[in-house]
Amino acid sequence: MDANDQKIKLKIQKEILQSEDDLVNWIESALEKCKYGRPNTRNELEEAQFRNLVRVADSTESPAVIKNFLRYQVGRDEKWGRGKDSLAEQIILDIDGNLRLEAGKIANKASSTDTKIIQIELIRRYLGYGSRYLKYLKVEDKNKQGNVAKENKTGNSEVIKKRT
């Protein structure tokens, strides 16, 4: 690898790091707004299922393979959601839209033709941040349920006290 190739790779890595806020925002928005198996429902999307998607992304250099795996998961059950408002569809839209466009911008800034490789790196990071955020959402949901249970318990005990 010559000095120019190294310079391009460093520029690509720098630009990817500068894109991280957008990656985080895109996946967090998808997880907050899209339809999928919410925590404590029959069709709950498990962290392990999301990690499987991350593993697929880590094992391929093809955005099409990742989208194919997601569509396979949608066909198996409803945990990823179904239809245009589903989490799976939003991830696919981000892969084909936001992440592809961002990869093109990065490649252009770095004077590189490796747009596909850049896109794969962006997808991997995007999904990794999604896995982390899903974990957070599950804990948040449990905390909310615990607070509701406490409120119900407190409310019920106050009613009992008033009766006596």
Image: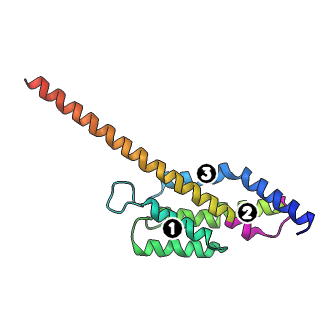
Using residue 122 as the reference point, say whether residue 136 is left or right of it: left
Q: How many numbered dots are placed on residues in this image?
A: 3
Residue behind mark 1: 52
Using residue 145 as the reference point, say whether residue 134 is left or right of it: right
Of residue 99 and residue 53, the one placed in the foreground of this image is 53
Q: Dots 1 and 2: beta carbons under 8 Å?
A: no
Q: Residue at x 48, y 76 (%)?
A: 72
Q: Which mark is residue 24?
A: 3
Q: Secondary structure at mark 2?
A: helix
Residue behind mark 2: 103
The quarter of the picture where the C terminus appears is top left
Residue stretch rendered in magenta on the structure: 109-120
On screen, residue 148 above or below 8: above
- Furthest residue to the front? 1
Label 1 and label 2: CA atoms lie apart by: 23 Å
Q: Residue at x 51, y 63 (%)?
A: 51
